[in-house]
Amino acid sequence: MSPRPYRLGRSLTGLGLFATRPIKKRSRIAEYRGRRLGIDAALKAEKSGNRYLYEVNSKITIDGARHGNIARYFNHSCNPNCDTFIRDRRVFIRTLRNIKPGEELTYDYGRDYLKNVIGLANCLCSRCRKRRKKHAAELRLKRLRRAKRLANAAAKGKVKKTAKKKTAKSARKKTAKRGSKR
Ligand SMILES: [Zn+2]
């Protein structure tokens, strides 16, 4: 596993891990290390604001807050390039696809964490930022289209009147012609 193919660096949410060289899909790149807590100790840690708790199962939670645990720096993403898996009650992080140098390494912390700790509206992952940007752009476009529609309708209001006059005239002409034929 070492030397690590990534480094600690600045990310939008503080610190994050960034690939320093290409990493192949399905590579095991880290272990989520830390003290193993029982249920009571885990609850206590959670209440004291520890955000680096990884629930391995209903009985064991890893307290990954210590600095020796590099895996604590993986940020959350709703569209992650890594995920976690458990083997022999140990937690590992692996890549989900090929990674390019410079890419931030992320995994999905899960719906509960996103909802209760990050907040659905506060997620800064690339997918959520893109989604929000798109939504804002769509709103802008909608407003623009509405303004255009109103302007067009106002302009058409004038055009329609003149058009009506014309068609009325030509209609009269037609009937007049037909009338003369008979
Ligand atoms: Zn997100």
Image: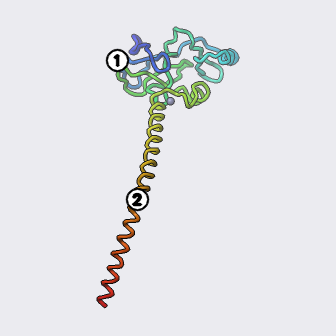
* Residue type indicated by callout 2: Lys
Q: Quadrant of the C terminus?
A: bottom left
Horizontal and vertical percent for residue 139? 47, 41
Q: In the visual, does 53 lie left or right of 138?
A: right
Horizontal and vertical percent for residue 43? 68, 18
Q: Cβ(mark 1) to ligand 1 < 8 Å?
A: no
Q: Quadrant of residue 2?
A: top left
Helix, strand or loop for disc 2:
helix
Q: Residue at position x 52%, y 16% from top?
A: 72
Q: Does the CB distance between marks 2 and 1 fall below 8 Å?
A: no
Callout 1 crowding tier (Cα within 10 Å): few <14, some 14–19, many ≥20: some
Q: Residue at position x 57%, y 28% from top?
A: 114
Q: Quadrant of residue 110?
A: top right
Q: Earlier in the sequence, mark 2 or mark 1?
A: 1
> Front-most of 38 and 146?
146
Number of marks in the rendered image: 2
How far apart are the alpha carbons under marks 2 and 1? Answer: 61 Å
Q: Residue at position x 51%, y 24% from top?
A: 76
Q: Nearer the viewer, mark 2 or mark 1?
A: 2
Q: Which residue does the numbered mark 2 point to in the structure image? A: 156
Q: Is residue 125 above or below residue 162?
A: above
Horizontal and vertical percent for residue 160? 40, 63
Helix, strand or loop for disc 1:
loop
Q: Which residue does the numbered mark 1 point to in the structure image? A: 21
Horizontal and vertical percent for residue 75? 49, 21
